[in-house]
Image (spheres, rainbow, N blue to C red):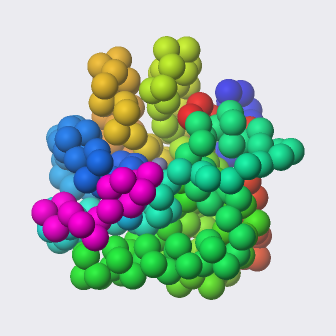
Amino acid sequence: MNKDALPQSGSGPQSCRLLLASIHDVGPRFEREVDTLASLFERTLGGPRFAMLVVPDHWGQAPLREAPAFRRRLRDWADAGIEIFVHGWFHRDRHRHSGIAGWKARHMTAGEGEFLGLDQAEAAVRMAEGKDLIEQIIGRPAAGFVAPAWLYGPGAQSALRTSGFALAEDHFRVWHPASGEILARGPVVTWASRSTPRQWSSRVVAALARRVLHGQRIVRVAAHPGDTAVPALMGSIERTLASFAARRRAGGYGELGAADTRMTSRPGMEPRNDPRGMSLQ
Ligand SMILES: [Zn+2]
């Protein structure tokens, strides 16, 4: 990562700076891991000031519809103030890809980019069903939609515009789907657990992020269930959350629309997928 290449948002008052932390792949399949991450986040951030990204039926093997106890936990988390996002439907990418999409699918997602190859119609159905299901469970609007592995193909991008979701994010930005307005810029700090070299490199990137991202108005940090199996990653996650939380407020994505936390926006800009990035997923 090159410090000069990082977007800078200028220096505002500390109260306007936000830390947006999230736990990915929340669902009955990873309940124990989600509990571990949720306790770490609560302890480090001083309360339930983070988001959960929920998968309605992870790999077709963990349907929320058949998990009443977990649905009650989701409702409790939402009642406690945790923002709940819809995170795909199956999570897994079942398409064959060519060209740049194939490169992304192989190198960035380990086959988990469900919304990379979907056409608009199928993406729209999965978004609508996910939104319905999650909103019934939590009894309030979902905070937004985040595609698995943060990857959106053209069909997913089109479907998202009319999905009714208030927010979406990828590796580099958070935007308002209906207008395309960018609400926050800057890379997500995240970790990869699936091989030792990736674990090492994501710790190095996180350590660098702890040095160079403090000038950003919005900092995003995301952890995954697999991280809990690697003590060195958990240590890195804790240090990273603590480092940012010491200099800014842990808040919610829903605050991005508020004038005092809004970054310079450029209405009409469409989000793009970008094969480069800090994420080493
Ligand atoms: Zn995910």
Q: Is residue 59 covered in magenta?
A: yes
Taking 262 as reference, is 253 left or right? Answer: left
Of helix, strand and loop, which mostly describes the magenta segment? helix
Question: In the drawing, does residue 138 fall left or right of residue 109?
Answer: left
- The residue at 68%/33% (across/down) is 107
Q: Quadrant of residue 188?
A: top right
Residue 235 figure quarter: top left
Q: Position of residue 51 (x, y in %)?
A: 34, 57
Please indicate whether residue 86 sits to the left or right of residue 7 in the image. Answer: left
Classify residue 240 by image quadrant.
Answer: top left
Residue 28 position within the rendered picture, expressed as x and y whole percent measured from the top left: 25, 53
Give the extent of the magenta segment: 57-70
- Confirm whether residue 243 shows in the render: no
Residue located 68% across and 27% down the image: 1
Picture residue at 76% right of the left edge, 76% below the top: 268
* Image: 113 above or below 108: below
56 is higher (above) or lower (below) than 105: below
Vertical order, 123 against 227 (above or below):
below
Question: In the figure, 127 relative to 96: above or below?
Answer: below
Answer yes or no: is residue 89 visible: yes
Q: How many labels does the image show?
A: 0
| Residue nearest the viewer, comparing 100 with 207 | 100
Q: Where is residue 165 in the image (x, y as percent from the top left)?
A: 51, 78
Direction right: furthest residue: 99
Give the camera-side residue of 62 and 35.
62
Magenta stretch containing residue 84, yes or no? Answer: no
Residue at 70% x, 59% y is 117
| Front residue of 57 and 19 | 57
Name the quarter where the C terminus is drawn.
top right
Q: Position of residue 31 (x, y in %)?
A: 22, 47
